[in-house]
Amino acid sequence: MLHIRPTAPTEPTARTMIDCCIFDLDGVIVDTAKYHFLAWKRLAAELGINFTETDNERLKGVSRVESLKIVLSLGPITLSPADFDAALARKNGWYLDYINQIGPEEILPGVAVFLAAVRARGIKTALGSASKNARLILERIDLLDEFDAIIDGNAVSNAKPDPEVFLRAAQACGIVPARCVVFEDAAAGVEAALNARMKCVGVGSADVLGRAHTLIPGFAGLGLDALLARLA
């Protein structure tokens, strides 16, 4: 789904080298990865597949269709097109049951404060996520109105590391890619940001996100000016 707040194109300014912050959702804004894991594990068990947290790491930043292909490869199991679609629907139904119970308490520490600081500086904010449930999640955690554009799995054709989701987010905000920074917790997302010719902040550990321009453990206590200085 494409959700865009009306905006006029913005030219780069001397104010800062960054005019748009683009955020991934799962693992960056909110931790719904645990609910994805529970739903995929339930589906895998139904198919006779042992699905572990290590296996789940391979699904980070990957589309629902590609994720199911990875799960099936663990069998290995082959499904007919009809059964494949039905499996996707079952997994998503279980996941929706979980996230319909979440609220603002699920926002990761420091995220709301950092978003407010970015917006107070006049920097655009966008969401760039493979999730097809991004809008629902943002509504549940009361952050929907904190983004100038929302580009999710319903609005793009290509999964990360393809840069489509981030390029569309920048376009929706009227900002050129070189003036954007992406916040990502998945290796595929970091690669997508680099492919888009954007700066990238990895949210997590260097062993997974080492190609990001800089790393943060999370948003708690993160100062905007200090971060911008690291990206200069």
Image (tube, rainbow, N blue to C red):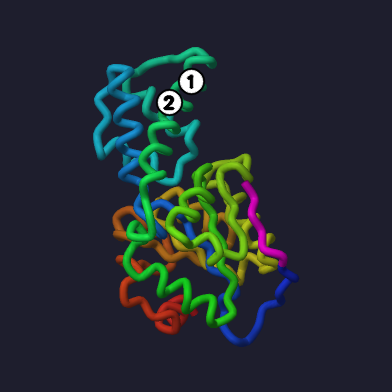
Pick the front one: 15 or 151? 151
The quadrant holding residue 18 is bottom right
Whether residue 183 sits left or right of residue 204 in the image: it is: right
Q: Is residue 87 above or below residue 35?
A: above
CA gap, disc 1 to disc 2?
6 Å
Question: What residue is shown with label 1?
Answer: 86
Q: Residues within 10 Å of mark 1 (few under 14, many from 20)?
A: few
Q: Residues within 10 Å of mark 2 (few under 14, many from 20)?
A: some
The residue sitting at 54% across, 55% down in the picture is 128
Query: Mark 1 near mark 2, Cβ–Cβ under 8 Å?
Result: yes
Q: Position of residue 144 (x, y in %)?
A: 53, 60
Instruction: In the rendered structure, find residue 90 and report the number of the disc placed on it.
Output: 2
Span highlighted in magenta in the image: 1-6
Tell me the kind of residue under disc 2: Arg
Whether residue 118 sits left or right of residue 4 in the image: it is: left
Q: Position of residue 53 (x, y in %)?
A: 25, 39
Whether residue 193 sits left or right of residue 76 in the image: it is: right
The quadrant holding residue 215 is bottom left
Q: Position of residue 54 (x, y in %)?
A: 26, 39
Reply yes or no: does residue 3 show up in magenta.
Answer: yes
Pick the front one: 25 or 11? 25
Q: Is residue 8 above or below residue 100?
A: below
Q: Secondary structure at mark 1?
A: helix
The residue sitting at 44% across, 33% down in the picture is 92
Q: Is residue 80 above or below residue 114?
A: above
